[in-house]
Amino acid sequence: MEYTVEQLLNLPENEVYKKIVEILYPDYPQAFEAANKILCVAPHPDDCELGVGGLIAKYSSMGREVYIIVVTDGSKGTTNTSIMPEELATIRRKEVEEACKLLGVKEIFWLGYKDGELEYSKDLFNNIISLIRLIKPDIVLAPDPTLKYEFHPDHIVTGRVTGSAVLFSGMPYFNYIDLEKKIEPHSVKYLGLYYTSNPNYYIDITGYFDKKLEALKLHKSQFQEIWDLFSKLVYLEARVHGKKINKQFAEAIRLLPTLLLHVYSFSEHI
Ligand code: ZN
């Protein structure tokens, strides 16, 4: 260790925790470059594209394997009663397939829970644990469940359950049935939270922003009617994040080492 505890204590408080992460996780600043596999968990069939579509396009084009889990069927995401929920679920499934093909996603997994009705359950927890163990990602992405003004229960539940699944996927006695099926435990290195108001990590998506926008445009059932306003918002957000790192476009996430997803209050300060 290049720093002694005394030297660390002499640093300003807001730098101590960042320095600890730097020492314990030397690859943290290049976490996505160092990763082989990235898994993004979406509450609905469009959230990974909106939250981290640029990141997905960037790292899949750099040879990383990107996987997506879509937790709910998205069957209630409309104001149009001329489309039945089952029909909408089918349409949205096709939209995700097209968008993910464009972004270079390797495989999509569908959990099929009912839109708007997601609850923190053992069933959901076990399903996500099993997929983490099968895919073996280095980094898992999910919505930040602590986003202050987030009122969509599916987003809050997806973030919480995914964080718990990341915490325990390396421990064989959680969802032990996997081991009986010869599905080995797998430890994830980092959890990345998108849709966050507390980002600590910016991804330069300059050169990939157009692809993100194109992928979102394929979600016609969601954005066609509001495209002018919506696309401006997406553009503005990427430019605002880009300014933080002196790039044209960026996405912002909160990246936390799995080891710090439990007990340590200083996770708030890294
Ligand atoms: Zn959503």
Image (spheres, helix red, strand yellow):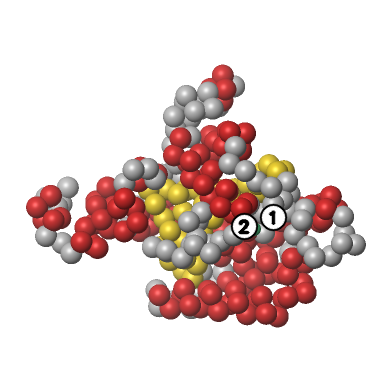
- Residue at 77%, 53% (x, y): give it: 75
Q: Amino acid at mark 1?
A: Pro
Does residue 89 appear left or right of residue 155 in this picture? right
- Residue at 53%, 75% (x, y): give it: 237
Does residue 43 appear left or right of residue 21 in this picture? right
On whether ligand 1 comes within 8 Å of the CB at mark 1, the answer is no
Q: Determine which of the numbered discs, if any, sits on residue 12 in the image.
A: none
In terms of depth relative to the viewer, which is nearer, 226 or 210?
226
- For label 1, the crowd category at 10 Å Cα-Cα, with few meaning under 14, some 14 to 19 and many 20 or more, is many
In terms of depth relative to the viewer, which is nearer, 59 or 268?
268
Return the x and y of residue 138 as percentages of the image width and height: 46, 45
Q: Determine which of the numbered discs, if any, sits on residue 152 in the image.
A: 2
- Residue at 78%, 62% (x, y): give it: 78
Q: Secondary structure at mark 2?
A: loop
Q: Amino acid at mark 2?
A: His
Q: Quadrant of ligand 1?
A: bottom right
Return the x and y of residue 158 as percentages of the image width and height: 58, 48
- Residue at 35%, 46% (x, y): give it: 260
- For label 2, the crowd category at 10 Å Cα-Cα, with few meaning under 14, some 14 to 19 and many 20 or more, is few
Task: Read off the residue under disc 1.
Answer: 45
Return the x and y of residue 68 as percentages of the image width and height: 62, 49
Q: CA distance from mark 1 to mark 2?
A: 14 Å
When the figure is inspected, residue 81 is found, relative to residue 21, above or below; the finding is: below
Return the x and y of residue 265 as percentages of the image width and height: 31, 50
When the figure is inspected, residue 8 is found, relative to residue 171, above or below; the finding is: below
On whether ligand 1 comes within 8 Å of the CB at mark 2, the answer is yes
